[in-house]
Image (cartoon, grey):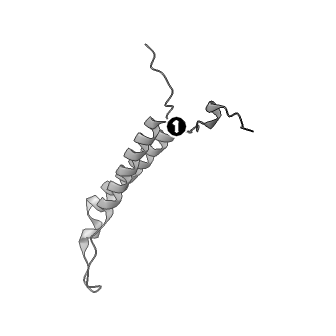
Amino acid sequence: MKKKTNKSAQQPHFVFGKKNYIVMAIGVAVIALGFILMAGGGSDDPNVFNPDIFNFRRIRLAPTIVLIGFGIEVYAILLDPNKKKKE
């Protein structure tokens, strides 16, 4: 005996739409950029101090970019992809 299956029951229902995933990918890229900007500034010799670890890029800019990326991720989660524009 064959089972009768409903084609609509076989379609997976995703919580997020395509627009959500695109915005999430942008957010992940911005977070990765922030961590890349934060990297570096070390010294090969532990007895030598390198003042580059305290420059503007690592202390202010990179953490700000990471926080902006997390904000984009929150926006992507809360974004309603099915919302129609009012015309």
Residue in the image at 25% along x and 83% along y: 48
- Amino acid residing under circle 1: Leu
Residue extending farthest to the right is: 1
Label 1 CA crowd tier, 10 Å (few <14, some 14–19, many 20+): few
- Pinpoint residue 85: horizontal percent, then vertical percent: 44, 20
* Front in this rendered view, residue 13 or 45: 13
Residue in the image at 72% along x and 37% along y: 3
In which quadrant will I find the N terminus? Answer: top right
Residue in the image at 28% along x and 75% along y: 42
Residue in the image at 27% along x and 86% along y: 47
* Front in this rendered view, residue 5 or 9: 5
Taking 1 as reference, is 64 above or below it? Answer: below
Please identify the quarter of the rendering in which residue 14 is found.
top right
Residue extending farthest to the front is: 1
- Pinpoint residue 9: horizontal percent, then vertical percent: 65, 34
* Front in this rendered view, residue 45 or 36: 36
The residue that label 1 is drawn on is: 78
In which quadrant will I find the C terminus? Answer: top left
Residue extending farthest to the top is: 87
